[in-house]
Image (spheres, grey):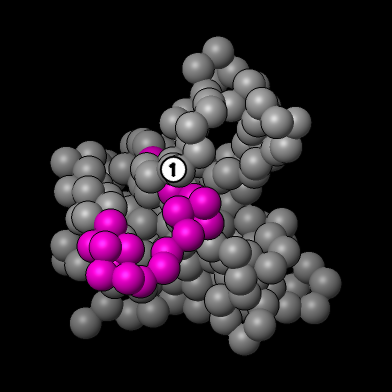
Amino acid sequence: MSANQLALEDITNGLEIIRVRYEMPDSSALVRYTTRFDDDQPEELTVNSSWGDPAVSAIKTGTFSLKNLVNELRFAYVLVHAFPDEKAMDYYLAGMDTGLAQLEFIGGNYDFDRMWVTRGVSNLELPVAIFLGQRHAVNAQPSVTLVDHRQQAMGEVVYRAVRGAGDHVGEEFFTQD
């Protein structure tokens, strides 16, 4: 079965998101979420980064499903964008970089240090871009949202997990029209 034929339930249950801790030259550390991790060649940190220094080292610190990932987040949200192929993913991410650069040019303020984007092909062979934002996204709770770009280039929100009390997670599937 190709990645484009995967049912939403297969993606939400089978997709693995990896938490990686990057050690920076100034002794700080950054946590990012990605689709794959190789100890010898860590993935590129972001699509657009204003830091000049590359990470000193990186270690894998966990693997999560979309539902389980939400309980790992504090004051943050994750958007997982699934694409039909890498070309569509690259096109989408290039447009985002251009749009944010334009926003900054006209006097807007978008902190690129807060724009944490990783990209890659997932364990399901599905091209994925993962956005990590620094605030609560839904009802003052951390959330993980799946945006499906496989049928519509703009993408559709098809799934969301929101952390509740303790380990309770509220899950919602959104039907596609």
Q: Is residue 24 above or below residue 142?
A: above
Instruction: Look at 38% across and 45% down and name the residue there.
Output: 48
Residue 27, how many percent across, how many down?
75, 31
In this rendered view, identify the residue nearer to me: 137 or 105.
105
Residue sitting at x 39%, y 79%: 174
The quadrant of the picture occupied by the N terminus is: top left
For this rendering, which residue is in front, 94 or 66? 94
Identity of the residue drawn at 65% across and 30% down: 24
**On-image quarter of the C terminus:** bottom left
Q: Quadrant of residue 31?
A: top right
Q: Position of residue 102 (x, y in %)?
A: 23, 62
- Residue drawn 62% across and 48% down? 64
Does residue 169 appear in this view?
Answer: no
Q: In the drawing, does residue 10 fall left or right of residue 56?
A: left
SS of the residue under disc 1? loop
What's the magenta region?
101-119
Q: Local crowd at mark 1 within 10 Å, few (<14), some, or many (≥20)?
A: some
Mark 1, residue position: 49
Given residues 163 and 92, the one toward you in this image is 92
Q: Residue furthest top?
A: 40
The question of residue 95 being in magenta is answered with no
Magenta stretch containing residue 104, yes or no? yes
